Structures are given as C-alpha cells and as structure tokens.
C-alpha cells in the first residue's frame, strides 16, 4: 500500500481533530497556576490564537488577583501587550474579579449590603 492508496482526510476528521486540539490546549492553559507562566505562554507562543487568549482573560485576572499586591501592576502591564486592553480597564476588571472572589468565598466582611446603607 502506498500513499496514493490511503483514504482521503475528510472535513469531518479535520474538524474533529481540530476540536480535540483546542480542548487539549484549553486544558493546558487552565492548568497553569502562575500568572507569569500563562502570560509567557501567550507572548512567546504564536500558535495560541487571539480568540483563545481572550477566552483566558478571566483566568488571567483570577491568577493576578492572587498575586502579591506589588506584583499585580507589573502583571497588568504585561497583560496589556497580550490582550490589547488598557491598564485602567484591566484594573477595573481585576477589582471586579476580587470582589466576585470574596463574595463566592463568603468573605464579605467590610462589604455592606444596599439595605444596610439605605437604612442609615
């Protein structure tokens, strides 16, 4: 059997293989727990599609929120080049991410509800 006798690679096979590749790539990116490593993966790996980068934006914010305060600005500036988002917007998104994390973890000390503010 030579190469000419092989079955042609169908569109369905290609689509299935591409979907598997994308799922494996997303799993690999989601497994990264160091924000610098994730940003480096985007910066130095051109095979990571632009859309995949933006799909990972919430994950990056999640990791940045857990970094030391002094490091967060440097991470945001590095992320600016990768995501093409202004640092001021990323800071707001980071603040929302931190608030969401606090609410989800039940750490609401220092947060007032609307009802308690309106009573005063």
Image (tube, rainbow, N blue to C red):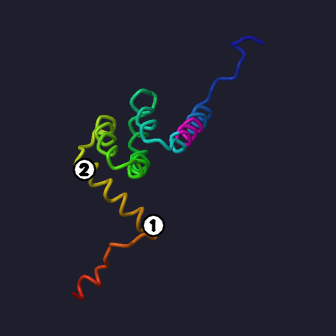
**51 or 100: nearer the viewer:** 100
Query: Which residue bears the numbered disc 2?
Result: 89
Marks 1/2 in contact by CB < 8 Å: the verdict is no
Predominant SS along the magenta part:
helix
Q: In this view, does 114 lie above or below 100?
A: below
Residue 63 colored in magenta in the image: no
Q: Is residue 112 above or below residue 68?
A: below
Tell which circle, 1 or 2, labels the residue nearer the N-terminal end.
2
Tell me where residue 21 sits by quadrant: top right
Q: How crowded is mark 1: few (under 14 residues within 10 Å), some or many (20 or more)?
A: few
Task: Indicate left or right for 87 with 101 as reference.
Answer: left
- Residue occupying image coordinates x 41% and y 68%: 103
**45 or 71: nearer the viewer:** 71
Taking the view exactly as shown, the residue that stands out farthest to the top is: 2
Taking the view exactly as shown, the residue that stands out farthest to the right is: 1
Q: For numbered disc 1, what is the local secondary structure?
A: helix
- Residue occupying image coordinates x 28% and y 48%: 90
Tell me where residue 4 sits by quadrant: top right
Residue 78 x %, y % = 32, 36
Task: Indicate left or right for 109 with 31 as reference.
Answer: left
Residue 36 x %, y % = 42, 37
Task: Indicate left or right for 52 with 74 as reference.
Answer: right
- Residue occupying image coordinates x 22% and y 48%: 88
Query: Which residue bears the numbered disc 1?
Result: 104
Task: Indicate left or right for 12 with 60 as reference.
Answer: right
Q: Which mark is residue 80?
A: none
Q: For numbered disc 2, what is the local secondary structure?
A: helix
**6 or 101: nearer the viewer:** 101
The magenta stretch is 20-28
Residue 28 x %, y % = 55, 39
- Between marks 1 and 2, how big is the CA–CA gap? 22 Å
- Residue occupying image coordinates x 78% and y 12%: 1
């Amino acid at each position: 059997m030579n190469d000419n006798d092989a079955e042609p690679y169908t569109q369905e096979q290609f689509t299935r293989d591409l979907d598997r590749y994308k799922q494996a790539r997303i799993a690999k990116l989601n497994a990264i727990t160091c924000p610098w490593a994730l940003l480096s993966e985007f910066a130095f790996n051109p095979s990571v599609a632009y859309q995949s980068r933006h799909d990972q934006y919430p994950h990056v914010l999640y990791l940045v929120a857990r970094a030391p305060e002094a490091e967060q600005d440097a991470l945001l500036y590095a992320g600016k080049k990768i995501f093409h988002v202004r640092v001021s917007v990323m800071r707001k998104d980071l603040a929302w991410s931190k608030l969401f994390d606090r609410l989800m973890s039940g750490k609401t000390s220092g947060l007032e509800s609307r009802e308690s503010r309106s009573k005063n």
